[in-house]
Amino acid sequence: MNGLDDNYLFEDKLVDSDNDGIYDYLDDNSDNDGLLDIEENGMANTLSGLDSDNDGLDDNFEGSNINDPLDVNDEINNPSASILPDLDLDKSSGGDLDYRDLFNTNPSYASTIDFDGIDDYLFGDSLLEGEGELTLMSWIKIDSDNSLGSTTILGEDDGCRLYITDGNKLMFGIRSSSGTTHATAGINVNFDEWHHIAGVFSSTTGELMIYVDGNLEGYILEPSLVGRTVSPSSDWNGSFEVGRRSTSLSGREHFKGDIDEIRVFDTALSTDQLQQMVYQEINNDGGFVKGTVIPKPIEDRDTAQKVSWSNLLAYYSMTDIKNNTTADYSGNDYELTLMNINTLQDQTAPMPYETVSDGDWSSESTWLHGDVWDIEEASQNKNWSIVSIKNNITTSSSHTNLGLMVDAGKELVVNGDNKIENTYYLELNGTLDLRGDSQLVQGLRSDLVTSATGKVKRRQEGNSSPYWYNYWGSPVGSLGTTVLTNNNTINNNTNNSE
C-alpha cells in the first residue's frame, strides 16, 4: 500500500501534440488548428462553476454519473461519439481525437501544403548530411507576394537546399565537406503557377545541376567537389526542413506558396530518369521506381538503367497527414512534422495534365487546373509532359509528349499541318483525328496501347506528280481486327519495354 490510486501507479509521458513547447495538459489548443480544445471536446464549452462530487472536474464535463469522485477517468475510458469526438474516424489508423487532431476531417486523397511565408514549415530528421550523391525535387507554386529576398523550399541549412532569390528565381546550392559553398541558378518562373524544381549533386563527377520543369537550366562542373559530401554549416539546427531554412540563426527565409510531391534520392538521377517522373507520382514495383500514370519503369534511355526504390531516401506526397505529421512513402519512416500549419489545399500540380471540358488546347478552361498550369501555351509544353485527354479537344499546334492518353468516346483533333509525337507511351482508346497533312510520329521506344474503340483518322493527300511521293506516312491502316492483336510484347516489337 502506498496511498496512491491504482490509476496513478504508472508514469505517463507528457505529450505535446503540436510541438509548440507547451504540454497538452497546459495547452488550450493542443493541435494548433485555430480551435480551442474546449470547443472540440464534444461536450460543453463553458463552466458551470459546480463540482458536485468534489473531484476537481466541473459538472459540465462529467459523464452520465456526476457523483463519481473516485473515477479519475470518468467516461474517457470508453467515450461516446459525442464525447471526445473523432469526426474523421482516423484514431484507429494512426490519427487522433479531434482536440489533438490538426485536421478534424481527413485531407483530400490528393492534397498539397500551403505555407504562409511567416512561420509555417515542416521538419524531420536529417536526410542529406554526409551524402555524396543526391537528387532533390518538388512541385512548387510561388505566391505573387513571396519575399523578394531569399526563401527556402527545402533542405538542410546551406548544406544542400533548393531555394529562391528575387522572389521567383529558382536556385540549388550545397556546402561541401571542404567548407566551400557552390550554387547554380535556374530561371525566373511565373508566380501563382505550378513549376517543378530539381537539384542534382554528384561527388563522383563534381557536377551540380538544377532542372526546372524537367529542363536543365543551370550546370556547374567543379573539380573540388569530387569526393566531397554535403556538410551544413555550424549554424545548422540538425533538421531537414521544408518551407524555411533549417538554421539556428534568425531570418529563416520562410517560403510563401504551395509545395507538393517532395522526393529525395541518394543518387544523381540522369536527365531521362528525372524527366520521366516529373509529371506523375511514383510507386514501388518489384524494387524499382515506376510511374503511377505511365505503367513503365523509370529508366535511362541510353543505358536502360532503372532507378532502384532503395535509392529513394524520402517521399512526401502530402496525401497522408495525421497527428501533425505527413507520411514518408519511401518506407524509411522519415516523417515530417507540421508546424503552425492548419490548412491544406487540394492537389492542383499537373500530375498529369488533364482536360476537364471540350474545347481548344490553348484555352485555360479546357484544363482541370488551367489557371495554375502552363499547358495551354504550346511553346511552353515540354517534350516529356504527360497529357490525359478526357474530352473532345482541338489543337492547331504540334505537340511532343512522353505520355498521351485519349479516353474512349473522346477525340483529339489536330488541324493544319502539325505533328503529334509520342516518345514513350501512347494509350489510344478514343480517336486521334489528323486533319490536313497532320501526322502521328511514334518514337523508337513509344509503346502503343489500344482498345477496340481506339482509332486514328488520317487525311494526307499526297501528290499526283510521278516525280514526287509521300516521303513518310503515319502507320495507319483500315479500321478492323488484324492478326497482330498485341503490339506491346518483345516478340512483336523489340523496342517496346514490356
Image (tube, rainbow, N blue to C red):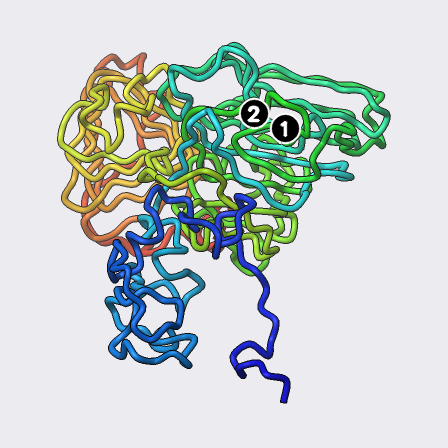
For badge 2, the amino acid type reads Thr
* Point 65% across, 48% down: residue: 311
- Which one is in front, 290 or 302? 290
On screen, residue 44 versus residue 498, left or right, reads: left
The residue to which callout 1 is attached is 161
- Visible in this render: residue 293? yes
User: Label 2: which residue?
Assistant: 152
Decide: few, some or many residues near mark 1? Use Cα within 10 Å; few <14, some 14-19, many ≥20.
Answer: many
How far is the residue under mark 2 from the one under mark 1? 7 Å
Badge 1 element: strand
**Residue 184 percent coordinates (x, y):** 65, 17
Query: Residue 14, located in which quarter of the rendered image?
Result: bottom right
Measured as percent of width and height from the top left, residue 52 is found at: 29, 72
Question: Residue at horizontal 79%, vertical 19%?
Answer: 222
Dot 1 amino acid type: Arg
Q: Is residue 460 left or right of residue 293?
A: left
Given contact means CB atoms under 8 Å apart, are the residues at marks 2 and 1 in contact? Answer: yes
As drawn, 218 above or below 71: above
386 or 488: nearer the viewer:
386
Upstream in the sequence, badge 2 or badge 1? Answer: 2
Q: Quadrant of the N terminus?
A: bottom right
The residue drawn where x is 83% and y is 28% is 226
